[in-house]
């Protein structure tokens, strides 16, 4: 498919997974990945990443700071399936087993500019008390088969989850050619830039 | 009092009280006013904001002009409250009048203070603000307007007046901060007044005078308070109540004294006279009058009653109430204070149109006996299938049930079409003209008129003859005149006709010439039209004479005519001349008179000439000129008639011309033809405006004719009102477009099928089409001229030829609705646009009448109930009656459509997105759909469209007989519906699909894990570890490999050491390998064919082909070779889609072919033998094993020994059984015939097979039975989770059915039973063979997702396709009917996996039948493919295997032993006697042998063509002699089922084809389609021989079995002539 330069729009996302608040847990690391539709393709940067392990700050805020950078560029022909970032946070439990501490997802902001997002995180619950105990004991908590589930609506009705904490993300979004293709996502500054007429 | 004024006062009071403050404020004000030099300038936002923040919403704000000042003073306003000095305490001592009140107030305090604490919380605090801010602001306002000075002026005035008030206010203020009850202040005052009035009248009296003032003041305060939010008012009231309570407490104490005075006193009984009582009653009672209340009383003053109805608003009908009651009510209401509001604007009591509640409500019934739950219990009732009554009606022969109209649509011809080329246009024109010509020729009007003329002339002749005496002369004259007139008329008509004929002929010739030139110009011919002009010689002389005579006659007549006319004109001339003369005379006399009167009336003179009519002098008519007449006649004759002697031209139009083939046409023409090819047309048949059926879509032929030839039998109930055909055209696979509608007449009742003539109905469409190729388009002007002049605009038009007739019933009665119904029909035909029925009054027809009725009955046009009717009337009477014949669900959809549907359909991007979201395989993984339409290439859709097209083609071409085509179509439908169902089911997720969770540990797991701790770290015998399974999503091409491990084979056929070899020692080309094997390997010169040991009889190797990749092993030797090689084949998923669903539907097979490698010495000359070896390697196919990929995918691995599918006759090979037996080992294996291969196949990495669909299907079964099945299955699964246990299955309509219902004795075809009447074993085998001949179609491939659909045996036989279950069920049913004890065995077999077999009990042993191959095995046969047994199913029970082992070798099949077999129906749950789903008996039709023979020839032809195709570089010669020999053999093979013929066969062949080296074999297959046959032939590799002088032979034989089951034999052979 001969796709000229003007027939796709680009979305550049950079920013970072700044910090998290998990009041009960410590020594966490996080993984992120992007979920996007069929018309999207990453052109540069990392789609997935895994951060260092961080411990809680000693001050009153008790924050877990990663400052883990995100830098990825997508190209697309269709805003359907706009990228979502999926975060999953892991950390050791009492016995030192790595268990999941939270899943969460958020869409990459549509409009260009700097955005801060705080995502609530949750984990799937065990189906029964006994299983809860054994999973705690064995250090094998229920996990999603695929963390990308949290970015979809399908099949969620069968799960029960518990909220765990928050992760704060910072996005800097730059788009290119969106307007040229007829998609207006920016804030109300449309009159400041002359809008090129959509060809066709 | 003006509220503003009042406020000003209050404010000034404050200022007078605090002078310092005032001064200060003054300064501030001045400052402020200075700082704001232009107070009336435009407002700036910020100060205003401040003010608005400061000030509460104030309705009494001054007019707009004051606003600037408000702003101006806002600063002061803020400061004001802060700078207020404390309230002076001295004010208390101010006035004597107040002292009393003060005391009283202090007294009150005590009672009040209690309530205060409670109130404190509730009372909103803004009180101080409320008092101050508006007042201060007002003050500022005032000051602002008059700039300080005004304030100075007003202040002194007020100061004196309001002094007492100020004092009072001060005192009030003094109290106010103390209780901190700001909102209560004025009301407290009021309360106080109240108390003083009631209990302290004396001290109050002197105060009466000053009283009004404070009251007034409080009133003002109250008024101000009203502006406050209601919460404060509420607080006020609270306060008041509190006060009253406090007072009451006091009062109560005081009241005790009075009680003491109430002593008992005895008095006489009072008598009150009735009058007094009445009077009293009148005082007490109110009796509303019954008189009508005048309207003015009911309405506010000076208001005229207003009648909404008169204004056109809808008012519903009021409920009926008696006039008197109404009056009473009105009177009653009027006495009440708020009574007025009960009356509407029209002075009547407000009333709802319908006082009845919409929803019924009733009080709950309280019954003690029954609990509510008992009443609410639901009763289960089984759904009953609804059988349409009319079907029974037909059966009983009742004629009133239904009727049938046969619509036969034979075809469609376009007289113009957008794709017409210019030539087509001309051709159409020509054809039309020719048709016209032929029609005229048939009528031959000119001839008729000529004859008539002749007759008339004769008549005139005879009339003129005087020898008719009996006719009176004048009578005669009259008729002659009439005749003459008629002659004139006829002649004119004839001339016109002749001229028309001639011009028609001329135009035909002209058009033909144009067409010829056009053909020359465009260098190709598009139409086969050809015009031939036939000259018919005429007798020159006779012709000329006739011509002259005709002209003569005509001239004579004309002459006569003109003579008469001349006479007439002369007559007219004479009379007019006379007139003129008279007039002239009169003129002269007049003139004389005029001259006399000239002086007096000068103006009259001028007028005088005018009134005279001034008739001109008539000119005498010219006498007729004979020469001129003749000239005229001749001219006309020359024009319209054939010249004498000129040959008659007879045009003949034929379709004999040849059309230029596509490749020789110019580009544009090719495009046009392609476009025509892409177009297809179909017709919809609409009966009473409802689509009832449609024809198949047919391609438009190059001649723009479409032949349908379809007859639609419309089963109708009502008299038909309209019958319409809609012509739809489709371009490619786009959406069909409606071209035109054709209305067919309803046939007369006498028109009956068979007698109805074909009629043509023309249609035309007004669509505008412009095309970019040679097609001229439609509705678009075009021209034949080069300069574009003489433009033509043609519209698409055509003709449909059809016939409509009433059908005739079985007993010869035409199926026509009776006349009575017809009448109803006519009426309903009138109300074609029937919207009235929607209102509920169907049958109304006349709109005008309806409108009249509506007007007469004074229907309220504004009543919403009548809305639709009114609208209908208005629409109908206005003439634009458009009643849609459909019901729109989303009526507003149109409004939301931002683009028309057509445009949307045209959008390629939209189409792409749609297809992708529909998960069409080609597009499922389409990434990055381009933004613009123009970037999407047509190429993208080509494959898809091709596939769609191909599918249709297969249906029409590949299936030679219609039955299979229908079956294929039906299967396709079933498949689609099932797939849709599964797609929905796939949306159901289970927790396990989403979340990984540890199982609940049970004791065994815990025990195991404990045991594991004790396990050795490095065991001596390591356990096999399961491979890691890979989810399908993150795979790509090349990641998956298919591993085929070929271990060894047993009992391969060996080359026959043909006796012929010794018989023909002259043959030079002995097989090299034989020689080599004979001499070097064994070093035994004595070795020969007679030696069985050490003999290299065969050198087999294995070739595995999968997805067009071929791998082969090395060559091993001997009939029991061992290769032990692993072959690796790459696997590619279709369309790069590695999802589970896609992998499930992979239809590829793994072919494992075993070949014998034969080395031939090709040396021509023995003398060169020393110099080098020239050998040719040939490979001979021995057999194959075919394993579907789906099996491997679901089984994960396949491990076992498989029977090799070896053709019954392998020429040149034989199974050397006797030798093996002699050797005495492997005796077990020798028990079964055939060759075997041991294989291990798996996929690397291991893929996770798809989960079966968990869907609960609806069922007709009893609920209890279903529960029992679930329980049974759960119990079985608990004990032996791996054993298959089946209790319910899904039938073809998607319903759950209990499995035993499938088993029932069913009769096999009688012919099969007849063959071996006395041999039941042979019959059983034959029946098994019959079943195995029904083609196999796995469900898992066709239905993505693991789900078996079980069809009943009759469905199975109708479909002629099914998988193991269907085969097994049918076979089992046959066996049951043969009287055997038979069961269905559910278990696992290789290579199929979970499957169904049939078990029969013969006299003393069990036999296991493979229903798909027709083979049977003993229970202890090692090579039985059935490896384990899960359950047995009989017609009345299910037995689950609870024995320790499940291999058929090790289990006991005695189902009567409950320890070994767990039965479903037992004593606790007896068999309820379930009815079978199978039919009563199977009906077999004999297969048409002719059709089979035809198919046989066809297949043979196809295969021969294929073989030639596969050998593109070599010449393929067919040995006809051999072919005929082979053809002769095949029926024998069929008869013997491929056994025991080898030897005779061989000798026969050798005898006939002695000097050929021959290799070949018959293949045997059930017939389903042509493709598998082709594949099978290809896989044998017969065509691969490239010996130059090779010849081939191929014969096909099809043996028909009943019910269209065909057994196909293909004999392929290659022959090499021995020199």
Image (tube, coloured by chain):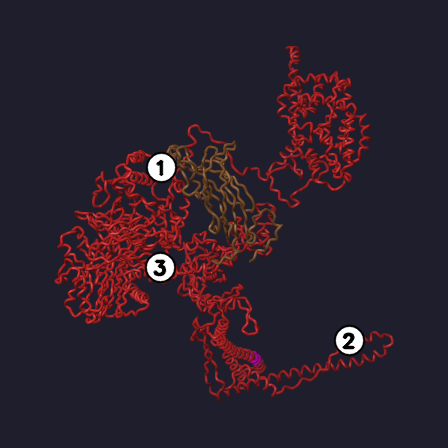
Chain colours: A brown, B red
Give the x, y percent position of residue A135. 38, 35
Q: Residue at x 75, y 81 (%)?
A: B582
Give the x, y percent position of residue B866. 57, 47
Quick one: SS at disc 1? loop
Q: Is residue B456 above or below residue B838?
A: below
Q: How many marks?
A: 3
- Classify 10 Å Cα crowding around label 2: few (below 14), some (14-19), many (20 and above): few
| Of the image marks 2 and 3, the number of the one nearer the N terminus | 2
Q: Is residue B200 visible?
A: yes
| Of the image marks 2 and 1, the number of the one nearer the N terminus | 2
Q: Nearer the viewer, residue B1109 or B1300?
A: B1109
Relative side of B1320 to A183, left or right:
left
Provide the residue designation for mark 1.
B999
Q: Mark 3 near mark 1, Cβ–Cβ under 8 Å?
A: no
Q: Which chain is mark 2 on?
A: B
Provide the residue designation for mark 2.
B610
| Of the image marks 3 and 1, the number of the one nearer the N terminus | 3
Q: Is residue B1358 visible?
A: no
Q: Is residue A86 above or below residue B965?
A: above
Quick one: SS at disc 2? loop
The picture quadrant where one finds residue B251 is top right
Magenta segment range? Answer: B484-489
Give the x, y percent position of residue A32. 46, 43
Provide the residue designation for mark 3.
B965
Residue at the far front in the pictured view: B1171
Alpha carbon of mark 3 to alpha carbon of mark 1: how far?
A: 51 Å
Q: Is residue B134 above or below residue B844?
A: above
Alpha carbon of mark 2 to alpha carbon of mark 3: how far?
A: 97 Å
The picture quadrant where one finds residue B1158 is bottom left
Residue at the far right in the pictured view: B599
């Amino acid at each position: 498919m001969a796709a000229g330069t003007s027939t796709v729009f680009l979305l550049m996302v950079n920013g970072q997974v700044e910090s998290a608040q998990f009041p009960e847990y410590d020594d966490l690391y996080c993984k992120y990945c992007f979920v996007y539709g069929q018309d999207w393709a990453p052109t540069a940067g990392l789609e997935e990443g895994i951060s260092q392990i961080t411990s809680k700050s000693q001050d009153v805020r008790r924050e877990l700071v990663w400052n883990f950078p995100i830098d990825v560029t997508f190209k697309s022909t269709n805003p359907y399936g706009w990228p979502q970032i999926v975060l999953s946070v892991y950390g050791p439990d009492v016995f030192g087993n790595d268990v999941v501490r939270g899943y969460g997802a958020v869409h990459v902001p549509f409009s260009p500019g700097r955005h801060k997002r705080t995502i609530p995180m949750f984990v799937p619950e065990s189906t029964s008390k006994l299983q809860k105990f054994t999973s705690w004991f064995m250090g094998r908590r229920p996990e999603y088969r695929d963390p990308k589930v949290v970015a979809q609506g399908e099949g969620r009705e069968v799960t029960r989850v518990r909220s765990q904490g928050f992760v704060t993300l910072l996005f800097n979004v730059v788009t290119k050619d969106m307007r040229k293709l007829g998609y207006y996502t920016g804030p109300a500054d449309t009159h400041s830039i002359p809008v090129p007429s959509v060809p066709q | 009092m003006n509220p503003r004024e009042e406020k000003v006062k209050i404010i000034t009071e404050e200022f007078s009280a605090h002078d310092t403050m005032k001064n200060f404020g003054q300064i501030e004000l001045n400052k402020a006013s200075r700082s704001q030099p232009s107070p009336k300038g435009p407002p700036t936002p910020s100060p205003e904001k401040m003010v608005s923040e400061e000030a509460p919403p104030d309705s009494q704000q001054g007019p707009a002009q004051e606003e600037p000042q408000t702003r101006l003073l806002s600063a002061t306003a803020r400061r004001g409250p802060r700078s207020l000095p404390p309230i002076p305490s001295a004010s208390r001592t101010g006035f004597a009048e107040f002292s009393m009140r003060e005391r009283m107030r202090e007294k009150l305090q005590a009672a009040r203070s209690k309530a205060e604490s409670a109130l404190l919380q509730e009372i909103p605090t803004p009180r101080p603000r409320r008092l101050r801010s508006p007042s201060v602001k007002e003050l500022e306002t005032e000051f602002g307007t008059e700039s300080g000075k005004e304030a100075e002026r007003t202040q002194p005035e007020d100061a004196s007046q309001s002094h007492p008030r100020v004092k009072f206010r001060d005192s009030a203020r003094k109290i106010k901060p103390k209780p901190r009850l700001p909102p209560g202040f004025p009301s407290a005052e009021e309360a106080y007044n109240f108390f003083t009035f009631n209990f302290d009248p004396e001290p109050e009296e002197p105060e009466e005078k000053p009283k009004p003032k404070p009251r007034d003041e409080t009133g003002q305060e109250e008024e101000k308070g009203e502006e406050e939010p209601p919460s404060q008012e509420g607080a006020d009231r609270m306060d008041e109540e509190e006060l009253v309570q406090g007072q009451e407490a006091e009062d109560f104490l005081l009241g005790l004294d009075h009680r003491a005075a109430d002593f008992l006193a005895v008095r006489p009984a009072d008598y009150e006279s009735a009058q007094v009582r009445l009077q009293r009653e009148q005082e007490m009672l109110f009796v509303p009058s019954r008189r009508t209340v005048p309207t003015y009383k009911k309405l506010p003053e000076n208001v005229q009653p207003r009648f909404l109805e008169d204004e056109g608003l809808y008012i519903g009908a009021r409920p009926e109430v008696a006039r008197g009651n109404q009056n009473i009510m009105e009177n009653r209401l009027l006495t009440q204070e708020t009574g007025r509001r009960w009356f509407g604007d029209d002075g009547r009591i407000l009333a709802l149109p319908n006082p009845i509640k919409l929803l019924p409500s009733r009080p709950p019934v309280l019954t003690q006996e029954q609990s509510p739950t008992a009443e609410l219990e639901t009763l289960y009732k089984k759904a009953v299938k609804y059988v349409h009554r009319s079907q029974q009606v037909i059966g009983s022969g009742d004629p009133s049930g239904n009727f049938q109209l046969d619509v036969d649509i034979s075809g469609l011809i376009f007289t113009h079409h957008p794709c017409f080329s210019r030539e087509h246009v001309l051709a159409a024109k020509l054809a039309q003209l020719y048709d016209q010509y032929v029609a005229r020729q048939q009528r031959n009007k000119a001839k008729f008129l000529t004859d008539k003329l002749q007759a008339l002339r004769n008549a005139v002749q005879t009339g003129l003859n005087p020898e008719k005496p009996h006719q009176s002369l004048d009578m005669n004259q009259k008729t002659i005149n009439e005749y003459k007139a008629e002659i004139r008329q006829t002649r004119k008509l004839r001339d016109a006709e002749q001229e028309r004929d001639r011009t028609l002929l001329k135009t035909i010739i002209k058009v033909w010439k144009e067409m010829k030139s056009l053909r020359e110009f465009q260098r190709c011919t598009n139409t086969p039209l050809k015009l031939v002009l036939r000259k018919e010689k005429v007798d020159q002389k006779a012709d000329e004479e006739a011509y002259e005579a005709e002209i003569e006659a005509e001239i004579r007549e004309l002459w006569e005519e003109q003579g008469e006319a001349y006479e007439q004109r002369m007559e007219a001339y004479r009379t007019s001349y006379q007139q003129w003369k008279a007039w002239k005379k009169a003129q002269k006399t007049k003139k004389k008179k005029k001259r006399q009167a000239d002086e007096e009336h000068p103006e009259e003179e001028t007028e005088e000439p005018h009134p005279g009519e001034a008739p001109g002098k008539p000119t005498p008519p010219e006498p007729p000129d004979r020469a001129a007449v003749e000239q005229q006649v001749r001219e006309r004759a020359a024009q319209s008639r054939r010249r004498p002697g000129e040959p008659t031209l007879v045009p003949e139009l034929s379709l004999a011309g040849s059309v230029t083939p596509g490749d020789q046409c110019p580009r544009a023409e090719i495009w046009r033809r392609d476009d025509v090819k892409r177009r297809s047309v179909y017709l919809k048949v609409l009966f009473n405006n409802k689509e009832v059926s449609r024809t198949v879509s047919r391609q438009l032929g190059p001649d723009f004719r479409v032949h349908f030839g379809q007859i639609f039998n419309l089963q109708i109930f009502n008299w038909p009102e309209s019958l319409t055909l809609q012509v739809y055209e489709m371009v490619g696979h786009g959406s069909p477009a409606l071209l035109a509608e054709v209305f067919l007449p309803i046939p007369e009742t006498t028109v009956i099928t068979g007698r109805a003539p074909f009629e043509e109905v023309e249609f035309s469409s007004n669509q505008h089409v412009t095309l970019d190729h040679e097609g001229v388009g439609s509705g678009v002007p075009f021209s034949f001229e080069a300069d574009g002049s003489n433009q033509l605009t043609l519209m698409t038009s055509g003709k449909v030829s059809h016939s409509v007739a009433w059908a005739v019933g079985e007993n010869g009665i035409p199926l026509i609705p009776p006349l009575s119904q017809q009448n109803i029909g006519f009426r309903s035909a009138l109300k074609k646009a029937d919207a009235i029925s929607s209102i509920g009054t169907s049958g109304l027809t006349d709109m005008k009448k309806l409108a009249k009725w509506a007007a007469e009955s004074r229907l309220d046009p504004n009543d919403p109930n009548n809305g639709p009717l009114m609208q209908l009337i208005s629409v109908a009477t206005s003439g634009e009656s458009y009643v849609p014949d459909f019901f729109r669900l989303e009526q507003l959809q149109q409004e939301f459509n931002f683009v028309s549907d057509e445009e949307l359909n045209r959008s390629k991007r939209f189409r792409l997105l749609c297809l992708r979201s529909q998960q069409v395989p080609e597009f499922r993984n389409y990434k990055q759909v381009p933004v613009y339409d123009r970037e999407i290439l047509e190429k993208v859709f080509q494959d898809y469209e091709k596939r769609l097209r191909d599918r249709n083609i297969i249906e029409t071409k590949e299936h030679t007989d219609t039955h299979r085509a229908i079956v294929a179509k039906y299967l396709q439908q079933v498949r689609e519906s099932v797939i849709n169902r599964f797609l929905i089911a796939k949306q159901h997720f289970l927790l396990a699909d989403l979340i990984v969770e540890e199982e609940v540990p049970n004791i065994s797991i815990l025990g195991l894990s404990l045991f594991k701790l004790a396990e050795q770290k490095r065991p001596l015998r390591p356990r096999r570890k399961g491979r890691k399974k890979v989810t399908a999503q993150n795979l790509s091409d090349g990641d998956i490999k298919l591993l085929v491990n070929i271990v060894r084979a047993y009992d391969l056929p060996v080359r026959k050491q043909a006796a012929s070899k010794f018989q023909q020692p002259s043959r030079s080309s002995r097989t090299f390998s034989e020689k080599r094997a004979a001499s070097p390997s064994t070093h035994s010169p004595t070795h020969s064919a007679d030696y069985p040991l050490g003999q290299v009889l065969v050198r087999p190797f294995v070739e595995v082909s999968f997805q067009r990749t071929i791998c082969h092993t090395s060559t091993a030797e001997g009939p029991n070779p061992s290769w032990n090689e692993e072959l690796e084949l790459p696997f590619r998923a279709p369309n790069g889609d590695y999802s589970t669903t896609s992998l499930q539907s992979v239809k590829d097979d793994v072919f494992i072919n075993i070949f014998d490698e034969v080395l031939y010495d090709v040396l021509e000359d023995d003398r060169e033998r020393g110099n080098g070896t020239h050998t040719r390697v040939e490979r001979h196919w021995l057999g194959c094993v075919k394993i579907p990929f789906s099996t491997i995918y679901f089984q994960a691995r396949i491990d076992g020994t498989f029977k090799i599918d070896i053709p019954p006759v392998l020429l040149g090979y034989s199974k050397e059984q006797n030798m093996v037996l002699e050797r005495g080992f492997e005796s077990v294996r020798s028990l079964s015939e055939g060759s075997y291969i041991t294989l291990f196949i798996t996929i690397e990495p291991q893929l996770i097979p798809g989960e079966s669909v968990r869907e609960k299907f609806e069922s007709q079964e009893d609920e209890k039975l279903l529960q029992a099945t679930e329980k049974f299955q759960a119990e079985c699964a608990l004990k032996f989770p791996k054993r298959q246990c089946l209790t319910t299955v899904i039938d073809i309509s998607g319903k759950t059915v209990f499995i035993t219902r499938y088993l029932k004795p069913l009769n096999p075809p009688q012919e099969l039973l007849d063959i071996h009447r006395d041999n039941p074993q042979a019959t059983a085998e034959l029946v098994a063979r019959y079943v195995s001949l029904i083609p196999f179609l796995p469900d898992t491939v066709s239905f993505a997702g693991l789900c078996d659909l079980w069809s009943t045996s009759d469905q199975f036989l109708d479909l002629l396709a099914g998988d193991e279950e269907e085969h097994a069920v049918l076979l089992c049913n046959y066996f049951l009917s043969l009287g055997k004890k038979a069961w269905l065995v559910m278990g696992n077999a290789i290579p199929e996996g979970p499957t169904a077999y049939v078990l029969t009990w013969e006299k003393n042993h069990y036999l296991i039948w493979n229903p798909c191959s027709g083979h049977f095995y003993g229970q202890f046969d090692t090579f039985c493919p059935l490896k384990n047994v899960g359950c047995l199913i009989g017609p009345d029970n299910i037995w689950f295997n609870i024995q320790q082992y499940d291999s058929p070798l090790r289990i006991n099949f005695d189902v009567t032993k409950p320890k070994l077999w767990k039965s479903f129906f037992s004593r606790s749950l007896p068999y309820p006697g379930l009815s079978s789903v199978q039919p009563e008996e199977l009906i077999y039709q004999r297969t048409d042998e002719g059709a089979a023979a035809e198919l046989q020839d066809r297949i043979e032809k196809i295969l021969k063509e294929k073989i030639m195709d596969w050998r593109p570089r070599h010449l393929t010669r067919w040995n006809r002699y051999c072919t005929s020999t082979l053809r002769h053999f095949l029926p024998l093979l069929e008869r013997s089922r491929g056994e025991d013929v080898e030897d005779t066969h061989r000798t026969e062949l050798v005898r006939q084809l002695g000097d050929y080296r021959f290799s070949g074999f018959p293949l045997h297959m059930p017939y389903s389609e042509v493709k598998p046959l082709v594949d099978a032939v290809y896989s044998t590799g017969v065509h691969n021989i490239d010996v130059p002088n090779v010849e081939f032979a191929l014969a096909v034989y099809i043996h028909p079995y009943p019910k269209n089951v065909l057994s196909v034999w293909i004999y392929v052979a290659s022959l090499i002539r021995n020199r």
